[in-house]
Amino acid sequence: MQTSCYVCNVKKYAPASTFPTDQPASQRLGVHGLCPAVSPEPEADGSVLFGHLRGTVVGLRYYTGVVNRGEMVGLVRQPQNQHDRNAVMVANIYGNQVGHIKRELAAAMAYVMDNNLAKVEGVVPSGTNNSFTMPVMLSFWGKEEHKATVNEFMARRGFKLNTSGSGGATGTDGMTIDLHIVLSFQLRNSFDNLFEGLMESKDGEKEAAKAVGTPLLPHQKQALSWMCARENKSGLPPFWEKRGELYYNSLTCFSAKEIPERVRGGILADDMGLGKTLTTIALILTNFHQGKPLPVEKCVSVAVCYFFQHLIFFTLCLNNYSSCEEASVFLEDLDFAAALGGSATDTGVKKKKTAKKATPTIDLSARTTLIIAPLSVLSNWLDQFEQHVHPDVKLNVYLYYGSARNRSKKFLSSQDVVITTYNVLSADFSCKSKSPLHGIDWLRIVLDEGHIIRNPNAQTSKAVLDLKAQRRWILSGTPIQNSVKDLWMLLAFLRLKPFDVREWWNRVIQRPVTLGDRAGVQNLQTLVKCITLRRTKTSEVNGRPLVFLPEKTVCVEQVELSRTEREEYELARNEGRNTIRRYVAEGTVLRNYADVLAILMRLRQHCCHPDLLAKTLSELGAGATPAELRERLIEKLRLVLASGSDEECSVCLDSVQLPVITHCAHVYCRPCIAQVISTEQVHDTARCPLCRSEIKTSELVEFPQEEVEEENTPNSEKWRTSSKVQALMGNLLRLRCEDSSIKCLVVSQFTRFLTILENPLREHGFTFVRLDGTMSQKKRTRVIQEFQSTAADSPAIMLLSLKAGGVGLNLTAASHVFLMDPAWNPATEEQCIDRCHRLGQKRKVVVTKFIVKDSVEEKMVEIQRGKQDLVEKAFGSTNSDRKTSRIDDIKALMEL
DNA sequence: ACCGCCGGGTGCC
DNA sequence: ACCGCCGGGTGCC
């Protein structure tokens, strides 16, 4: 038939063509259900609107694609169209062809599109009764420098773009970057709310299969029930309803003639410690095909022969189902059972059959769940399988890791579970044709710590998107890091139509949300809500807390400085105060922000221990040589970062990654500031987002690689104590007397402070381990295992750097936490405390925060509180508010 | 498409 | 009749 032939044309030829986004049409628009997700990320930012044009879509009667009033359509070049090589196809969001752009207009558009002069988007203003043609409103978007060319060209062809109202919010004046900062700030805060309110009970509870050896807690049964439902329910996906002949989406107003595909899976975003791993194991064992438990081998015989598997399958079923009613179903499942045995030819035939059908039927022979996890948690998965699968049951779990890994597809797809890492997956993918992981039809894929694949351009992300599976899950304690963009990758992985295609995501969600459209945020929220289950430790079910956690007490212990310490402190404070006072008077606080932070840093170090200051550069005069300037900048960078402070990048508002310092002494992530420079450079000179000084890529200074913390082994003879050290030791000694089995975490942001603390610990005969960010993964795991051990000679104390390890650490052996110095971000402290105040903690948890009396530390605590208030009402705050609040913070800290 | 366009049939009123 | 007019066939790119 002609119709399908045209669509096939798209499929076949489009990859050779050029699109404004550099993507093959088939991928961009998901024509014909091709996997749309593997594609370079189009740079949606920085485009300006050139203007609008009213055009005509013709040939409607030849295609099945439907569009409603006001709905968006995609425009795809069809250079290989045999009737007209200028053809521009019109498709709806689901990739179904609606028609073509009328010939003459298409000819003009083809030139513009093929030469990447503009990206054209279409909206159908009036749904139409006309079965032959319909009007379409086209908008042209592109780089500012192409605007005139495009508008002139189109006008010459008789298509004058209407440019009224196209000045636009994406204007390119000097405020662009500031705007970006404001928006990303607002967004971050709306995201904090995005995952709120997801904890209301979604479904009932479900008992796990007998093969799960550990009894589930109520909230885990609830999660299991929700997950099973998401995998099994075959009705319409949320927001879809049938209206006459069409399926209609009440959220997006799209409709389609075909039954919409349901996302089988979702995001389990429970707080860490609530048992996502156990719940996932329960899901694997409980929800095989057709809602039945996974048929598993019994452990009786060592090696069960293939032919006996069926027999055992039936025996197990009889064990699993007690009711006669369900037992009678068995015969119907004969082929299902046979498929489990998995003769290769049999599966092959089945696959072929399914592939041909238009509506995807579910391949019942798929057996294996693929779990992809960061290397650091691999062992945790293995442990948890060991621990939670009933001892009578033999579950085939294969660790796909290491050079000797078994790459046989047949072998892998006969496992119950295959576990691998993101890195292994990515490495295999680099030679895709040989990647066994990409050749298997998985029953289910589970991404552990799924947020780590948030960059869609990363090789790993592409490797993940390219996997084939029936059901997909993302486990993540922190599903959103800092922007809407992060979410796209998650939705694309889940194949949440139509947003797995970048264009629709950008147009329906990303752009509206970025421009501050409430409805956009609302849609996003609704969308996320229906695929996510999130509970926090403090969530309640039926008025009762989700998990029982022992009581936690937080107390602040004031530390008095000794006289000498106080004198030194006051000296430094007065000096710093004078400097900052001058900056405030000049209005140059932000211009000298790094200097200000350095002053604060020194004061904070004074509060801990004088030796932390040893490496501070003596004051340098002005008028330095370039080499000296560079030295000073590196020194500032060191002060800001190296001691473990939690500085945020003002562009992405996240902790700085790949830090660089500008000549105006502001610290950013290299990629962030590089982007600022490249977008601003186009017009004129690039300016620092914080102080508007001129900045250049060539002048960005990085922390020298070779300076890997020259570990001056602390000289114990020269060692001296400090008031804060004394305060800690007093507590530790007292605790050891009271109960020698108590274990403690001693936490500081300054790794050098941890080093100093090693001295008194040794002196008093404490056994301790140390965990900081510089340690290899292997070393970390060993240290944690040592610390968690209940053996009598196991370490009683862990010296922990505040930001080490990040998520997922389990330090429940400790019941006392000593926070040696306050952090700017109270959430970081909370996270750290949560490492021991979590599931598995048997004792009451006591947290002690040491705060030096009459010092910058006290002020920091006050600001911590203030900042939380600020964040709560942050939606709507402006950039200048933010700047003022920073300056106010600094004034308060210095008591100005 | 209740259109435009094409091309064959037709031809005073 | 090298026109006009009528009415049927037909129709995206």
Image: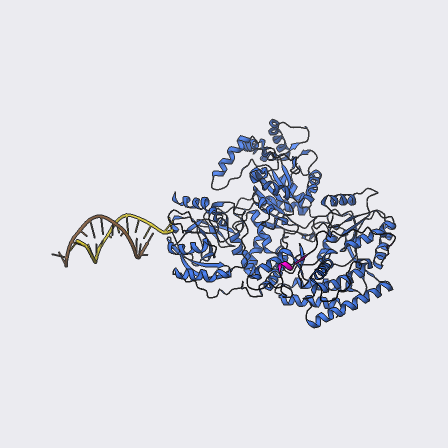
Chain colours: A blue, B brown, C yellow
Q: Is residue C8 above or below residue A573?
A: above
Indicate the position of residue A125 as horizontal and vertical percent values.
44, 59
Start-end of magenta stretch: A696-720
Q: Nearer the viewer, residue A444 or A283?
A: A444
The answer to whether residue A423 is seen in the rendering is: yes
The answer to whether A22 appears left or right of A185 in the picture is: left
Q: Quadrant of residue A172?
A: bottom right
Q: Quadrant of residue A191?
A: bottom right
Q: Is residue A890 above or below residue A315?
A: below
Indicate the position of residue A39 as horizontal and vertical percent values.
53, 48
The answer to whether residue A205 is seen in the rendering is: no
The answer to whether A117 appears left or right of A280 in the picture is: left
Q: Nearer the viewer, residue A200 or A40?
A: A40
Task: Give the position of the N terminus of chain A as an image quadrant.
Answer: top left
Indicate the position of residue C3 as horizontal and vertical percent values.
20, 57
Of all residues, the one furthest to the bottom in this rendering is: A585
Number of numbered discs: 0
Indicate the position of residue A599 as horizontal and vertical percent values.
75, 64
Q: Nearer the viewer, residue A731 or A637?
A: A637
Residue A489 belongs to magenta span: no
The answer to whether A650 appears left or right of A608 in the picture is: left
Task: Give the position of the C terminus of chain A as an image quadrant.
Answer: bottom right
Instruction: Determine the main secondary structure of the stretch shown in magenta.
Output: loop
